[in-house]
Image: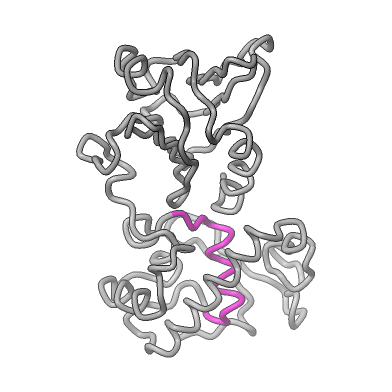
């Protein structure tokens, strides 16, 4: 499953080339997975340049100078990448945005539900998923105070449940939720309502620290012997204290814990 830093790295792979370039043709390979009418694509995407490539949670947003945007939901996996137009698309190809120079931006996805949406900028009225997304965890708007305020609205939630609730905070997946809890030193099954403001502020600190490092220095983070993400095997020693890691099932996900390093309520 894709995590937020994976989406950032994906964007880095094509945004430099695609930003500022004009789309010559939109090819819809799977109409059932694309909330995109061909006539609307011709009117609002073809012959228009990509003005910006953005991310909100795990969604990738292409903003066009037509004042419309394509939103790609990456929650179910998939990839957006540059390819030559001469290379045949694979079976998971959903939509292709072609440039005049012979390259194209491809979106492949294992999901066949509606995962691509065309929106007028600022209008999410026809969109189910992204409309209800909470604040992006790397947004400057997610201050410690805002995180505490968000937390107090979900007092019965577990800490991990809050971190992975896309309506509260958009884009944190299973592995990084565990990493944030581990680095902050709290068990992921703590009830948010049992935590003090100081404890929540500490979670916010490590939320930002973990995701920023994984986004900016992915290889370094995934080679760090002190990170839980590199030791996710039940019974493997904790990277800090060598206590055997244990697992629990939390919000339907396998969750790794060091019972010595992570405080319970």
Q: Which residue is rendered at x = 37% and y = 34% of the image? A: 69
Is 184 left, or right, of 87 in this rendering?
A: left
Q: Which residue is rendered at x = 73% and y = 62% of the image? A: 230
- Compared to residue 136, the image places residue 75 above or below, namely above
Residues drawn in magenta: 171-186
Q: Which residue is rendered at x = 66% and y = 60% of the image? A: 216
Q: What secondary structure is the stretch in magenta mostly built from?
A: helix
Q: Which residue is rendered at x = 44% and y = 15% of the image? A: 30
Looking at the picture, how far across and down is residue 213, in whole percent? 65, 65
- Compared to residue 84, the image places residue 8 above or below, namely below
Looking at the picture, how far across and down is residue 86, in whole percent? 68, 9
Residue 118 drawn in magenta: no
Query: Which quadrant of the rendered structure holds the N terminus?
Result: top right
Residue 177 drawn in magenta: yes
Looking at the picture, how far across and down is residue 52, in whole percent? 47, 41
The picture quadrant where one finds residue 241 is: bottom right
């Amino acid at each position: 499953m894709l995590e937020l830093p994976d989406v950032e790295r994906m964007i880095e792979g094509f945004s430099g080339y695609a930003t500022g370039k004009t789309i010559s043709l939109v090819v819809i390979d799977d109409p059932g997975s694309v909330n995109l009418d061909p006539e609307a694509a011709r009117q609002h995407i073809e012959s228009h340049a990509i003005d910006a490539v953005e991310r909100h949670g795990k969604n990738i947003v292409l903003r066009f100078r037509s004042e419309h945007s394509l939103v790609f939901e990456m929650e179910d996996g998939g990839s957006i990448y540059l390819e030559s137009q001469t290379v045949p698309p694979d079976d998971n190809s959903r939509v292709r945005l072609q440039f005049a120079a012979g390259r194209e931006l491809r979106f492949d996805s294992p999901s066949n539900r509606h995962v691509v949406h065309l929106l007028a900028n600022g209008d999410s009225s026809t969109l189910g998923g992204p409309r209800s997304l909470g604040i992006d965890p790397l947004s400057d708007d997610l201050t410690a105070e805002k995180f505490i305020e968000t937390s107090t609205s979900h007092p019965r939630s577990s800490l991990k449940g809050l971190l992975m609730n896309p309506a509260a905070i958009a884009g944190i997946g299973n592995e990084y939720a565990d990493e944030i809890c581990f680095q902050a030193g709290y068990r992921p099954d703590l009830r948010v309502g049992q935590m003090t403001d100081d404890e929540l502020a500490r979670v916010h600190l490590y939320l930002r620290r973990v995701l920023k490092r994984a986004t900016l220095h992915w290889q370094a983070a995934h080679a760090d012997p002190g990170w839980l993400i590199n030791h996710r095997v039940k019974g493997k020693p904790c990277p800090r204290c060598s206590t055997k890691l244990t697992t629990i099932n939390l919000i339907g996900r396998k969750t790794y814990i060091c019972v010595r390093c992570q405080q319970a309520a």
